[in-house]
Amino acid sequence: MLKLASIYKVEEDEDKPLEAVPLTEDKTKKYEIQVSDRVGTINLLERMENVIMYSTGIQDYVPPKVRKLAVEIMKNHDLIKDILGEIRQKYQRQDKDFEISLDDVEEYKKYQILELFRKMSGIISGVRYNRENNTIKCSLTMTQKAQRFITGQYLEIAVEGVVNDILSEWAGSKGIPYKVYRNVKIESLNGTVKNEFDIVIVIRNKFYIVECKSGKNFDDWNRLSEIAVDYGILPQRMCLVYSYATEEDIQSIEYFCEYYICDTSSLRNKIIQMISFG
């Protein structure tokens, strides 16, 4: 388990004022976070006490080839979003044989789809394009790791990469310390998981949350808003990356829910906006 950035405990002494003291650097343990509103060292958790925060993403090694593939899928989401929806249904039915029609797809896009499928080695096998009936046939790898990646994890990995690139440029040039963590869990001391976040950004002890939704039918806008209120990060320190967000969705949700929302094409601009003004 990994301690998130500079986590502090509060020590009290009758003869001296409260001060923040760094916890031990032993990275083999989970860390208790004790938060005092009077000190306010942990902005994310200023309303909560006695919780454990740790990243499981640090243990999940992702090879460079897989990270690159995740970014390519994200960049081509508009091209293959309907296909990804069909793949999700195939996994739900445990049906590995896959055939898609390209009848309504422009000619140059057919080859883009075919090329992208051929890059998904380990997830998709036996990719064949049939010119006669204009279809692509292939087989899905029915492992949990392959299913998890292609049905949503690719977006988390790709967004993590984009966020790291932005912060390396933006914060690095200013000498501002930062950390980025993927798959962050917050637990009570008895081990009950209170919340899980896809990506947590830490800049100067300020926490920012990025949630990624790759499915087509997400509409739980109020739940995200309630979580953000609980952690004291509204307004402007939460961003939802929703692959199917329309411009109308974005305007309305940002106005009423007070967190950022973007599709994959506007991701970079929204992250820069969030860390600049949050």
Image (cartoon, rainbow, N blue to C red):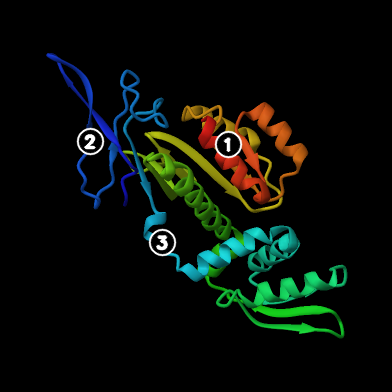
Pick whichever, 226 or 174, lies toward us.
Answer: 174
Residue at left offset 25%, top offset 31%: 9
What mark, if any, has residue 60 been given in the picture? 3
Instruction: Name the kind of residue labelled 1 in the image.
Output: Gln
Residue 12: % across, % down: 18, 21
Which numbered disc, 2 or 3, marks the residue that appears first in the sequence? 2
- Foreground disc of the pair 1, 3: 1
Find residue 274 and report its image quarter: top right
Vertical relation: 236 (above or below) 128: above
* Secondary structure beneath label 3: loop
Which numbered disc, 2 or 1, marks the residue that appears first in the sequence? 2
Which residue is the extreme one toward the left? 15
Give the class, few, some or many, for how many residues have Cα within 10 Å of label 2's Cα (few <14, many ≥20). few
Q: Are marks 2 and 1 in contact (CB under 8 Å)?
A: no
Which numbered disc, 1 or 3, marks the residue that appears first in the sequence? 3
- Foreground disc of the pair 2, 1: 1
Residue 110: % across, % down: 78, 73
Q: CA distance from mark 1 to mark 3?
A: 29 Å
Which residue is the extreme one toward the front? 173
Instruction: Name the kind of residue labelled 2 in the image.
Output: Pro
Which residue was labeled with disc 1? 273
Give the class, few, some or many, for how many residues have Cα within 10 Å of label 3's Cα (few <14, many ≥20). few
What mark, if any, has residue 22 been given in the picture? 2
Total labels: the figure holds 3
Q: Are marks 1 and 3 in contact (CB under 8 Å)?
A: no
In the rendered view, does 49 fall on the left or right side of 67? left
Asked if residue 95 shows in the view, the reply is: no
Vertical relation: 48 (above or below) 159: above
- Foreground disc of the pair 2, 3: 2
Residue 14: % across, % down: 14, 14
